Amino acid sequence: MKRRFCEVLILSIIILAVGACAGKLPTEPTLRIETGMHSAPITRIGVDVGNRYLVTGSNDKTVRVWELATGRLLQTLRPPIGGVDEGKIYAVALSPDGRTVAAAGQTGYEWGWNVSIYFFDRASGRMIKKMSGLPRVISNLTYSRNGRYIVAGLVSKKGIRVYRTTDYRLVLKDRDYGDSCYGADFDKTGRLVTTSWDGYVRLYANDFKLITKEEAPDGKRPHGVSFSPDGAKIAVGFTDSTKVDVLSGEDLSYLYSPDTGDITNGNMSTVSWSQDGSYLYAGGRAQKFVNEELKCITRKWRDEGSGGYVDLPAAENTIMQIIPLRSGGIVFGSADPAFGVFDASDRLAVYKGPEIADLRGNREGFLVSDDGATVQFGYERFGKSSARFSVSERLLELNPGPSDSQNLNPPVTSTADLNIADWKNTYQPKLSGRPLKLEQYEISRSLTVSPGGKTFLLGTEWYLRLFDGEGTEIWKVSIPDSAGAVNVSGDGKVAVAAIADGTIRWYRMKDGKEILALFPHKDRKRWVLWTPSGYYDAAPGAEELIGWHVNNGKDAAADFFPASRFRAAYYRPDVVAKVIETLDEREAVRLADEESGRRKQAVTVREMLPPVVTIVSPADGAEVSIPEVTVKFSVRTPSGEPVTAVKALVDGRPAAAERGVKIVEREGDVQELRVTIPERDVEIAVIAENRYTASEPATVRVRWKGAPREEFAVKPRLYVLAVGVSNYADKSLRLSFAAKDARDFVTVMDVQKGRLYRDVVVKVMTDEGATKDEILDGLDWLQKETTSKDVAMVFLAGHGVNDPSGVYYYLPVNADTDRLKRTGVAFSDIKNTVASLAGKAVVFVDTCHAGSVMGARRGVADITAVVNELASAENGAVVFASSTGRQSSLEDAAWGNGAFTRALVEGIGGKADYTGKGKITVNMLDLYLSERVKELTKGRQTPTTTKPHTVPDFPIAVTR
């Protein structure tokens, strides 16, 4: 029997309610996925009265605040977390005034034997109150319409609690519930209605005295509940029925049921009236085919639910909650995870879907190589959009060829000696007819027999379990989400699991220890691969996809720091590659350090934590009418390391600012920066640094009061530094087209003079003119000439190499690879120039060339670290790189260029103008380069573009 998410979640909550044990709050940093969207199902949502903000809570242990009108992420709230389940959010609510976010679920039980409700300031993300002492997991939270009260529904017969929000005093404790409470709503007079799986609906007066308790007419498990705007009616949805009932708001007597006769699957568990009461909405697990896709629907009935209906295809998984909007329409949250807004015309006006690969339903297509270093999976459910990832090659390949040539094998699910049955989506898998021992409500999801047939691996909702041929468990390990597929390498040394959180994880077969994890982003470009201690490898732009969650105590919001903040110490592709070989992280580090000559890492993540900046004012979205903005901010130092510098950015580039910032010793002291902005809407960011790293930018958007000006109404100058070396002094390094690439790039950009730019000023260096001294002088020239109103471009073609310690050097014409420090252009010189440029900065890097078009690789460098560092928020450059991973950048006489430059010249020349409006932006050029280079090289080369999130998309060229 296949169970849907809603049922699995509810059963999991019940287990957690009685199965947790007390412990200590973890103080060590914890690695987490971070995509800017939830990575696990959204369980509940909340909206303020003004419909400005949406909050979403999730099993991924975060609460997120969104701008409702656009779906833009404003804030990520992080409660303290613990083991596998501690910190999962099952309930959220937003106060009617939009100031306070309440969140709860599996929150605080692990270290206190009771559950807590966390209250956050929505604007700052600060935890302002922790209310403890609740005896069970909290399944729902609801504010009264005037914001004076909040009700918490509990699981496992513990009833409800109502608190007064002025002082958080308990005003009602009703434990007379025979099962869990999953639904609650207030009407405008303050009356309260609740539902419980004991089969009853309860109605309370505005003094919280019970008016009546009635058995629900059409289901044993009433779930969602909603008052009509006038309080005269109450709608109820069920988890065990496709019915929806409408009851009297006076005495809970049955009135009628909206038409659900054609719904034969799932349920309509969540319900909501429209703001004016004329429509009734419901959704849940009920599905219909829309354009040949099976979608969970939201049904909208006319005439208060008694009339006809329209079905709105909303999501691929359970609709968890629906909330009406004052302009008509609704906002919904689903288990995909996803949320969306249907407007009054039933148009899907806003939609934010999952950012993770859907690794479910692809058991047979989850392939693993003999050595465990290569896996094949699908980005979409049931294995669609297949991809192959090689740890050793650091390469993600889309739509790969036949797997037999790669020695990739599917899971083995049966042998002559092992008769394993009933293991797909059941509670009781069997070996030779005997049930395997699992926990109550633990669902078996996937299976593979190990090579040799002596053991088998079972993937469940909560664990990986290795059994011997007699059914005796050898080991079990907790996993972050359901195991959609499992496999074992052909050599029997490594188990690999495809997890529902979008990760693929490697485990050592001898003891079940996790040794490696991969997160392939849904965009099919970015990926990050990491060890349990946080050593990582990543595609360009992917370092932000994981990071460190750091608890700040039981009564404070936690911090999160992306992996990029620790790049200098933890970006270690050499370590990651050796983990598969050694099956031991510590040994992999030792070997990699020995080969590179690095010293052993002596500083821990906690000791390297960056500062945390909070902008006090202006508020996000504030209007300004003068071009000088005073930004007030405070800085915390979690590591204790003193702040060494503070700087401001405007739209991602260094701001013209008064730099009289005092580096204060006391945390929380408010400081000021006066920042000059252009006369248009902009984003201002503040970054603080310590001796190890820089903070994440604290950002605020300000709106120019009055008619915004066109971004380039006053045309900027363009400064171009182009370097290309073909005719190296070292003949073994010589290339065919790198010098020509630089000249061709300059030619196509020079056409922009008088178009997008009022002037194009060029310094081009090729072959004999591209010495180290000349290049350094060129960088100095670029830095001195570029103003805040200008655009600067750096184009590098030729060879780049890394020294044994990983430092990148661009090779000038007179480079000696045995004397890189003296003859190579160090990356630090390039980075320092780019970071200090006052205007927009764009870098084109084509330095991983092969000696001939499909010949032996020469001078192949790890360009990824260079790209990620240049594009980090504190450096702020847009970077276009010619290739990724260990790919070589190719050149061919048929193109007359390198593939990258050929596509670049074509794109800027007009072919990247996809809209036909005569403007080519960063994003449009990225798309053209990606497709064109793949076409030219038949998929052998994949260019990448990385843009800081603080830098908005902007035009690079125009065609007329």
Image: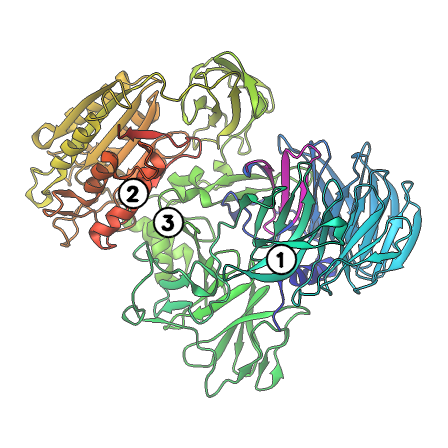
Marks 1 and 2 sit apart, C-alpha to C-alpha, by 37 Å
Q: Which residue is mark 2?
A: 928
Q: Work out whether residue 81 can be spotted.
A: no
Count of labels in the image:
3
Marks 2 and 3 sit apart, C-alpha to C-alpha, by 14 Å
Disc 1 is placed on an element classified as loop
Q: What amino acid is found at the position of numbered circle 1 in the picture?
A: Thr
Tell which circle, 1 or 2, labels the residue nearer the N-terminal end. 1
Q: Which residue is mark 1?
A: 318
At x 17%, y 36%, the residue is: 811
- As for residue 420 lying within the magenta part, the answer is no
Q: Quadrant of the C terminus?
A: top left
Q: Is residue 812 above or below residue 524?
A: above
Disc 3 is placed on an element classified as loop
Tell me the crowding category of disc 3: few under 14, some 14 to 19, or many 20 or more residues within 10 angstroms, Cα based.
some
Q: Which residue is mark 3?
A: 525
Marks 3 and 1 sit apart, C-alpha to C-alpha, by 28 Å
Give how far across and how far down residue 767 sits, in percent: 9, 33
Start and end of the magenta stretch?
44-70
Tell which circle, 2 or 3, labels the residue nearer the N-terminal end. 3
Q: Quick check: 271 left or right of 727?
A: right
Front residue of 666/316: it is 316
Q: What amino acid is found at the position of numbered circle 2 in the picture?
A: Tyr
> On residue 150, which mark appears?
none
